[in-house]
Amino acid sequence: MTLRVGIIGAGPSGMAQLRAFESARQNGAEIPHIMCFEKQDDWGGQWNSSWRTGLDAHGEPIHSSMYRHLWSNGPKECLEFSDYSFDEHFGRAISSFPPREVLFEYIKGRVEKSDVRKYVQFQTAARWVSYNELTQEFTLTVEDLPTGSTSEHIFDKLVVSTGHFSFPAAPEFTGINSFPGEVLHAHDFRGAERFAGKNILLIGSSYSAEDIGMQSHKMGAASVTFSYRSAPMGFDWPENTVERPLVTHFDANTAHFSDGSSGDFDAVVLCTGYQHKYPFLPSDLALKSKNVLYPANLYKGVVWQQNTNLFYLGAQDQYYTFNMFDAQAWFARDVMTGAVELPSLEAREADIERWLGLQAALLDHNAEADFQSEYLRELIAATDYPPFDLAAVSQLFKDWMGHKATDILGYRDMSHRSVVTGTLAAKHHTRWLNAMDDSLQRYLQGPSQDVDTATLDAVTAEAISR
């Protein structure tokens, strides 16, 4: 009987799983019967951005937390596919920190070169999963969103690739309900133009706070204040930006901080993270974890410990992204097909505990980058995923973090070298701080207004079709 594999989500992780099976097929292997379900109308997950917040046209919660003017906040060389380079896709060197639309075109480019879209049912939401211990089969109930009709599908293996950056964690603060200005979570942030001339408070001290704060500065905010819970980010901020300890309460538009200081604000953005939430899974199959580099209960960060027919992709905090999802998908594929034999429950538990112990001992961001590099090294060694220089990528992470520490507004203007092709990234035609048009066309063709639109469209289409 042909193995039946269900994949929930066609974002970068789900796309990686489809590509892993396609790679096996190209190498002559017989692949399973595959069905992938994606509730959006296109693949790409977070990178398939929407202007909407709240609910989509079908009443479904908006998945993507992307926003206009989002540029990569890490070097593209750290996420490059080892079997599909940026040079191959764009036909030339591009800069190290592209905007969202450019990265979306890149991740689509690889899967669009293979015939895997046929496996995906779009505008189809996973509603419920049950597992039959006797038959060792999953029953997945899905809904076709345009028609409202539901159907059931039986699978031997199930892959959860929905990510964990869509369900906001939004703590309460005394008095925030009476704040007269705008209050929103980073998940619903869609652009900083509205904050021009305003005083903005961002509660949080991680990547989303940092980036939305500097986007707001870029778009002309009068002032930017970060409120941190445990420790300040400590970057060399511009003059209109400060850090304060955690908010204790609000009194109208005044925020009071735990050091006794206060300030008046026009808007508050909660950059307070996200929850691991899988509403289509019963509790005994649903991962419960904070955003950590190695979640407990997942062998090799992928295989559900109590049911090795269930797999999670991209469930951890991430230094690596696209190429890590690849390594996980290749490993999951080989476990599903039997090419990788799993050890006993006890041996898997010991391996998980070893990784959790290593994680607990991490002292700084550099150690974290090395930790995740070693994790990928172990996954890649177990499969035929094309290897790449992980030590070099880990050093890229460290260089990037150093550049951020010295120039928070200019680090995106740096050029890094690809570990896949050896190509040094091109210097972008416009400094990030001055780049107000984040479209694919303007990114590829530059700021000149002298080229006619038809020519721009033709050249851009040629680049993204390579």
Image (cartoon, rainbow, N blue to C red):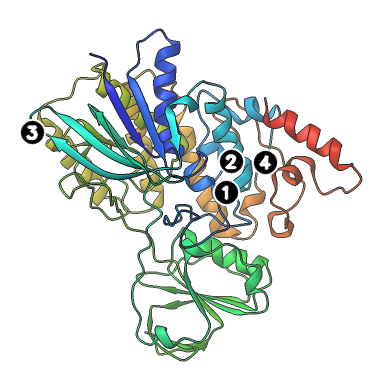
Q: Which residue is mark 4?
A: 95
Graded by Cα atoms within 10 Å as few (under 14), some (14 to 19) or many (20 or more), the crowding at tag 3 reads few
Q: Amino acid at mark 2?
A: Leu
Nearer to us in this view, 390 or 83: 83
- The vertical placement of 165 against 105, above or below, is below
Q: Is residue 76 visible?
A: yes
Question: What residue sits 48% from the left and 60% below the top?
Answer: 208
Q: Amino acid at mark 1?
A: Ser
Callout 2 secondary element: helix
Mark earlier in primary sequence (3, 4): 4
Mark earlier in primary sequence (4, 1): 1
Q: Which residue is mark 3?
A: 346
Image position, residue 158 (x, y; %): 27, 33
Total marks in image: 4
Image position, residue 139 (x, y; %): 22, 35
Mark earlier in primary sequence (3, 1): 1
Question: What residue sits 42% from the left and 55% below the top?
Answer: 60
Callout 1 secondary element: loop
In the rendered structure, find residue 103 and report the number of the disc placed on it.
Answer: 2
Give the CA separation, mark 1 to mark 2: 8 Å
Image position, residue 310 (x, y; %): 23, 34
Q: Amino acid at mark 4?
A: Ser
Callout 4 secondary element: loop
Q: Check whether the beta carbons of the residues at disc 4 and disc 1 lie within 8 A of each other.
A: no
Q: Quadrant of the N terminus?
A: top left
